Amino acid sequence: MSPAPFTWMWLADGRLSLEGRPGARRFGVDARCLDGVAVPDAYVHLCALEDPEARIPFDQPEVQQVRRDAYAWWIPLLGEDLICLSTLSLDAVHYGGAVTVARSPRRFRDDPFARLFPGRVLRSDLFCSVDPPPGPVLERYAGAPWPGGRFPAAAAPDA
């Protein structure tokens, strides 16, 4: 696993990349989605915009609700098709979208994250299989994109 709970991904001209370039929009994505053997030619439902003004604070009720819906029915609906999913963070406070990666796009029309930013289907060789989150954790860790992250390890008490 990567040492950081997230890694950066860029969006420009409707394409995702792990390398930044001028004018590309940067998003934090759960590092586990990119750390491992990539699933070739996976379907990506990207619910994010290139517009730098497209942002919502993570604590807004509508963002909380789509995350609840992801646990309640979106992840189970995808079943074995699910490769990974992550919210996309812009910074420690702002939600910039979400990405759901699957072996088939047949359920993408039901994506709850598309209620916040419209979704579009892409094909990609960037993403790795990640076990679905066990739930019911809805909180984010230290500004990391949901469902990734962890609290720092506690220091051992002085003996």
Image (tube, rainbow, N blue to C red):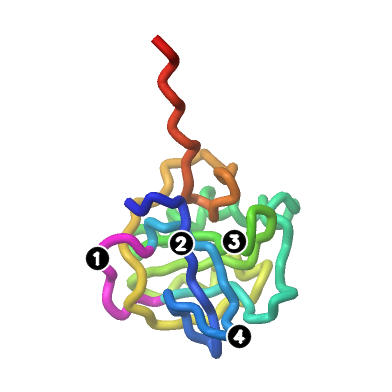
In the picture shown, does residue 77 fall above or below 101?
above
- Residue 86 rendering spot, x and y as whole percentages: 49, 60
In the picture of the structure, the residue carrying the numbered disc 1 is: 37
Q: Quadrant of the C terminus?
A: top left
The residue type indicated by label 4 comes to Gly
> Separation of disc 2 and disc 1 at Cα?
16 Å
The residue type indicated by label 3 comes to Ser
Q: Residue at x 60, y 67 (%)?
A: 97
Q: Is residue 24 left or right of residue 132?
A: right
> Separation of disc 4 and disc 3 at Cα?
17 Å
| Residue 16 part of the magenta segment | no
Instruction: Choose between 100 and 72: the one closer to the eye.
Output: 100
- Residue 9 rendering spot, x and y as whole percentages: 48, 71
The residue type indicated by label 2 comes to Thr
Q: Residue at x 43, y 54 (%)?
A: 76
Which span of residues is magenta-colored?
34-43
- Residue 18 rendering spot, x and y as whole percentages: 42, 74
Q: Is residue 103 left or right of residue 53?
A: left
Query: Mark 4 Cα within 10 Å, few/some/many (few <14, many 20+)?
Result: few
Between label 2 and label 1, give the one nearer the viewer: 2
As drawn, the residue found furthest toward the bottom would be: 13
> Separation of disc 4 and disc 2 at Cα?
19 Å
As drawn, the residue found furthest toward the top would be: 159
In the picture of the structure, the residue carrying the numbered disc 2 is: 7
In the picture of the structure, the residue carrying the numbered disc 3 is: 89
The residue type indicated by label 1 comes to Val
Asked if labels 2 and 4 touch by Cβ distance under 8 angstroms, the answer is: no
As drawn, the residue found furthest toward the front would be: 158
In the picture of the structure, the residue carrying the numbered disc 4 is: 23
Instruction: Choose between 42 and 71: the one closer to the eye.
Output: 42
